[in-house]
């Protein structure tokens, strides 16, 4: 079992979440997300019974930009639905200097609060405020979306830590598609710290020969045509078309774009589905899984923190992998989301 898999919430049958038609299989995120949420709800109930309080997710917002509020609101609603306590912390203000100080103070306060198991902050942070403001203040043990350098470094080194939920969702979709990963040629399009690079490190660790492409890649199609697995996270609608794919390739489309009022991915779905053996739809593919996995990370963080304090937390799975061999999770070493 690989370190980023939420151990208590799988495996599903190989066909779970798949629809099949005459073209490629279309792995759907929603049924997998439902199953993960059911497992999370069970763990939350056990945690709450053992601790006398629900695990708490703190969501920090700055300036309330409309798209990120929609995203964060969805997470809070999904948290409530599985029994997780949501705490919205608003950092108002117009002056970036003052707001950055208040943002750092809010994240530090939540990091020090034993009742809070996990913290996420609105991304992107408003113009004039550096993401370092959050990174420098967050306890890596509560960094359930894997932005802290300690978690990023653990992933890079092949140890357990929190990985960004979107990258985790992309890998989960790939695994559930049943595609062989070991020995596969994989191309990741996008090298951002939240999606492209974590996906690439996970694929490499899982045994795929992995190439990272980006906006300076000279001949993107030459890379994708040689790939058994293509993960696209570029934010460019229609970037990958069917003629750029190897027949039978498995395509994970992470992109979310609005075109003519409709949500579309980065892959030209109509042409790609004629060539690929499986392709995740947008909407309905990776997206629904991302939120469910964030909740799985939260409950895992809560369990590990409770275990580190020596208090019972219900169902705490054993940590696996080299990072856990030296002892239990602690406040200075991030909880595993294995
Ligand atoms: P990002 O930070 O803007 O990174 C985009 C990456 O794509 C960059 O590495 C960029 O290359 C590369 N790129 C851009 N144009 C390209 C081109 N023409 N050819 C090849 N590579 C190109 O975006 P992100 O945060 O990683 O997000 C990527 C996509 O995933 C977006 O559509 C976003 O909305 C979506 N997303 C989805 C979820 C979800 O839950 N499904 C969550 C988060 C994000 P350079 O590095 O050279 O600039």
Image: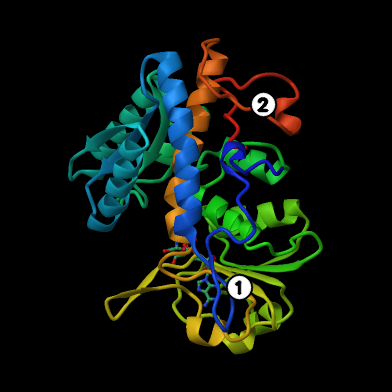
Q: Nearer the viewer, residue 94 or 240?
A: 240
Left or right, residue 297 beside residue 177: left
Q: Nearer the viewer, residue 183 or 151?
A: 183
- First reached walking from the N terminus: tag 1 or tag 2: 1
Left or right, residue 318 beside residue 313: right
Q: Which residue is depicted at the point 19% across and 39% down?
A: 92
Q: Which residue is depicted at the point 34% across and 43% down?
A: 78
Location of residue 17 in the rendering, given as x and y in whole percent from the top left corner: 53, 60
Left or right, residue 99 beside residue 224: left
Rendered position, 302 above or below 59: above
Location of residue 31 in the rendering, given as x and y in whole percent from the top left corner: 47, 56
Q: Which residue is mark 2?
A: 318
Left or right, residue 246 beside residue 47: right
Give the quarter of the figure containing the N terminus.
Answer: top right
Rendered position, 221 above or below 328: below
Q: Which residue is mark 1?
A: 278
Give the quarter of the figure containing the C terminus.
Answer: top right
Observer able to see residue 240: yes
Q: Is mark 2 within 8 Å of ligand 1?
A: no
Q: Secondary structure at mark 2?
A: loop
Q: Nearer the viewer, residue 332 or 265?
A: 265
Q: How is the image coloured?
A: rainbow
Place residue 99 in its image quadrant: top left
Q: Give the CA distance from mark 1 to mark 2.
A: 33 Å
Circle 2 packing at 10 Å, graded few (<14), some (14-19), many (20+), is few
């Amino acid at each position: 079992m690989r370190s980023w898999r939420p151990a208590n919430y799988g495996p599903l049958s190989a066909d779970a979440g798949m629809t099949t038609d005459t073209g490629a299989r279309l792995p759907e995120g929603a049924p997998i997300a439902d199953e993960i949420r059911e497992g999370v709800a069970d763990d939350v109930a056990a945690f709450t019974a053992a601790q006398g309080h629900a695990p708490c997710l703190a969501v920090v917002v700055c300036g309330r930009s409309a798209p990120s509020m929609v995203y964060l609101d969805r997470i809070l609603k999904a948290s409530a639905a599985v029994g997780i306590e949501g705490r919205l912390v608003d950092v108002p203000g117009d002056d970036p200097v003052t707001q950055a100080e208040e943002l750092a103070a809010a994240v530090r306060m939540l990091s020090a609060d034993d009742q809070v198991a996990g913290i996420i902050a609105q991304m992107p942070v408003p113009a004039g405020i550096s993401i370092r403001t959050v990174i420098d203040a967050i306890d890596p043990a509560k960094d359930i979306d894997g932005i802290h350098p300690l978690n990023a470094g653990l992933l890079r080194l092949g140890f357990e830590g929190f990985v960004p939920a979107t990258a985790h969702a992309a890998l989960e979709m790939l695994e559930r598609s049943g595609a062989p990963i070991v020995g596969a040629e994989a191309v990741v399009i996008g090298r951002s710290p939240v999606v492209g690079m974590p996906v690439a490190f996970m694929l490499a660790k899982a045994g795929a020969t992995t190439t990272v492409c980006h906006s300076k890649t000279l001949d993107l199609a030459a890379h994708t045509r040689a790939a058994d697995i293509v993960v696209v996270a570029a934010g460019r609608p229609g970037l990958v078309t069917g003629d750029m794919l190897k027949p039978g390739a498995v395509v994970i489309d992470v992109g979310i774009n609005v075109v003519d009022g409709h949500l579309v991915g980065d892959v030209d779905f109509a042409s790609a589905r004629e060539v690929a053996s499986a392709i995740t739809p947008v909407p309905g593919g990776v997206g629904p899984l991302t939120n469910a996995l964030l909740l799985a990370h939260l409950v895992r963080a809560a369990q590990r923190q409770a275990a580190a304090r020596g208090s019972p937390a219900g169902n705490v799975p054993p940590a696996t992998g080299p990072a856990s061999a030296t002892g239990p999770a602690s406040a200075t070493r991030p909880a595993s989301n294995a």
